[in-house]
Image (cartoon, rainbow, N blue to C red):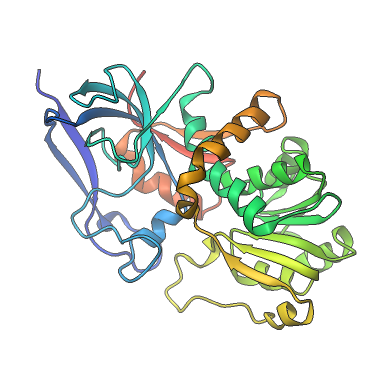
Amino acid sequence: MSRINHQVRLAARPVGQPRPTDWEHVEEPVGEPGEGELLVQVLYLSIDPAMRGWMNAGRSYIPPVEIGEVMRAGAVGRVIASRHPGFAVGDHVSGTFGVQEYCLSNGRGVTKVDPALAPLPTYLGTLGMTGLTAYFGLLDVGRPQPGQTVVVSGAAGAVGSVVGQIAKILGCRVVGIAGGERKCRLVVEEFGFDAAIDYQAEDVRKALREHAPDGVDVYFDNVGGDILDAVLVRLAHGARVVICGAVSQYNNTEPVKGPSNYMSLLVNRATMTGMVVFDYADRYPEGIAELAEWRAAGRLRSIEDVVSGGVAAFPETLLRLFRGENLGKLVLKVGGE
């Protein structure tokens, strides 16, 4: 029986928040794998803030998605046909399969995952790219020491929640910044942070003086904008600022707002460093092994916010990120299993 592949392709470069007209929904027959290829049925898609940047033209850490291309997305799925020596029918795999129901792959960048060890969506979150982003960004760039104060923005999100938990494992005091009472309660009660600041209801600078009286030793930034500025004025001597993302700026129609308090870096002999997880590709096994060990020991919790609806629901599901509606890792369920 011939299969039909439903895809979501980029139809136009968004101006501001993506609109329905920026997407094209396409149907096409599913091909059979050639020599050295495998066919994957996509089961779950990773929904990430970085997707917004991938839609823009111009130089970045990764080439943009071109007009007419299937939207880039990390995913997990099941091999349903294979002529690749490294993969067999029935294997579960993760890779950049895109917003579609089926993907033909040559195997590059595809990794086997074990659903007996963790639910498949977890391989898109804590045991996937977001967990690895938190792991390498905090440990290699932030370099926290026991007893130091670590502040994390986007603390209820996929990366931020893992950053804070790793910092606690390392013996740090951890303060999360999140939007809304529900998220702040989650950050403290479920993820074990020492304190949470609700940027929607509190003065962030004042709250930082209370929760980080001796200054911030490591700031892991996922949001940019005004919150980055607020933390900069509270840096401790020798602080490290990790720039992971700037979700508050992604849908701006004006130029990105840079930090006005950057002179705090000079005064406090601090550093601000950008990090991209792809730079650590040769060390992924190391990161996943330790993350999995912490998770198995109950020291690392993961929450996946799984939305149903298939690829047709992708445009609206993506917008949930920018409305701040997700808790933990946002995942779109595509196929059945």
Residue at (74%, 46%) from the top-left corner?
Answer: 167
Q: Quadrant of the C terminus?
A: top left
Whether residue 235 is visible, yes or no, is no
Q: Is residue 63 left or right of residue 119?
A: left
Q: Quadrant of the N terminus?
A: top left
Q: Is residue 266 left or right of residue 99?
A: right
* Number of numbered tags placed on the structure image: 0
Along the line of sight, the residue nearer the viewer: 201 or 151: 151
Q: Is residue 163 left or right of residue 20?
A: right
Residue at (14%, 29%) from the top-left corner?
Answer: 33
Q: Position of residue 262 (x, y in %)?
A: 67, 80
Along the line of sight, the residue nearer the viewer: 25 or 136: 136
Along the line of sight, the residue nearer the viewer: 112 or 160: 112
**Vertical placement of residue 39 versus 325, above or below:** above
Q: Position of residue 213 (x, y in %)?
A: 90, 64
**Vertical placement of residue 175 versus 45, above or below:** below
Q: Position of residue 173 (x, y in %)?
A: 83, 50
Residue at (22%, 29%) from the top-left corner?
Answer: 38
Query: Which quadrant holds residue 254?
Result: bottom left
Whether residue 109 is visible, yes or no, is yes
Query: Which quadrant holds residue 8?
Result: top left
